[in-house]
Amino acid sequence: MPTAPISHPTPDPLMETQLFWARNKMPILIAIAAILIALVGYGAYQYRAARRAVAAAAALAQAKTSESYQKVISDYQSTPAAASAYLLLAAEQRMANQFADANLTLQKFLHVNPKHELVATAKMAIAANHESLGNTEEALDTYRRLAADHPKDFNAPLAMLAQVSILKRTGKIDEARKVCETILTQYRESFASAEATQQLRQLKPADVPAAPSAAAAPNGTDAAADLQPGVDDNANAAPAQGAGGASVPPIVVSPAASAAPTP
């Protein structure tokens, strides 16, 4: 006896959707609420940050003294205006010959803003302050590290030229020449190459001896005269005195006459 085929019910998409919603309604609503809260919070943070940055920029525009720059730094930390205030404060301190304080300000700037676009400029200022303090070795080391760490920055060739100046003052002529040659090799198209070329022309290698001076001939006569062919030594002698005090011209025998055979 044949068996009847088993029929499977056709799934209803609408029913399955309703069942899924009924089972997962609360987790879905919670996730949507969390996303909305995060978006609202991020928008509010961005709004506050933008208003704070505008206020910081306004305060920096009105700042003219070291105290006002310090107030911008303390009131608006982590803003672009605060970073600029560090650099302006360091410039004010340098103008007041407070080189050590200026370096402390610049070191704080580097610590707070390690990725700032003016990091190399701050390091250049630190090296210049070391020079003003008489710390030649610290300044030279700072210039070298700046050129090595930021080779693409516009301050790199300037730091190398500053090295040349220090090396010249300390008598390290060969090292100064090497730095100039490096500038001409790595920064040929930069404005510093012209200055490096001029410095290289002025720097003489330390191992080049001085040109010898012409030696004086015996008896005070010129050595060049002794080397002239066909001139006898008697030509340089004083004219002989003849009878009655008349001077007798010296007899000069040419090499051709002396070489002629005697009849």
Image (cartoon, rainbow, N blue to C red):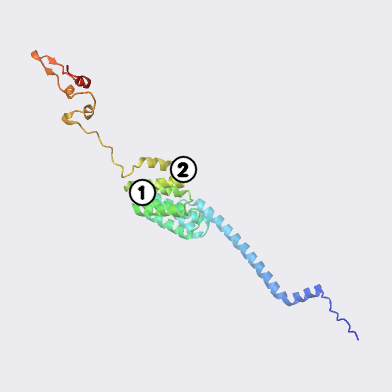
- The crowding category of the residue bearing disc 1, from other C-alpha atoms within 10 Å (few below 14, some 14 to 19, many at least 20), is some
The residue tagged with tag 1: helix, strand or loop?
helix
Q: What percent of the width, then of the height, locates residue 60?
A: 50, 53
Q: What percent of the width, then of the height, locates residue 3?
A: 88, 84
The residue tagged with tag 2: helix, strand or loop?
loop
Q: Determine whether 17 is above or below 60 in the image.
A: below
> Which residue corresponds to the image point at 43% horizontal and 56% vertical from the top-left?
106
Kind of residue sitting beneath label 1: Glu
The mark total stands at: 2
Q: Determine whether 222 is above or below 133 in the image.
A: above
Kind of residue sitting beneath label 2: Phe
> Which residue corresponds to the image point at 41% horizontal and 57% vertical from the top-left?
104
Q: Give the Cα separation between the discs numbered 1 and 2.
A: 21 Å
Residue most extreme to the left:
244
Report which residue position mark 1 lands on.
175
- The crowding category of the residue bearing disc 2, from other C-alpha atoms within 10 Å (few below 14, some 14 to 19, many at least 20), is few
Residue 110 shows up from this direction? yes
Residue most extreme to the right:
1
Q: What percent of the width, then of the height, locates residue 150?
A: 47, 53
What is the number of the mark on residue 191? 2
Front residue of this view, candidates 124 and 99: 124
Front residue of this view, candidates 35 and 97: 35
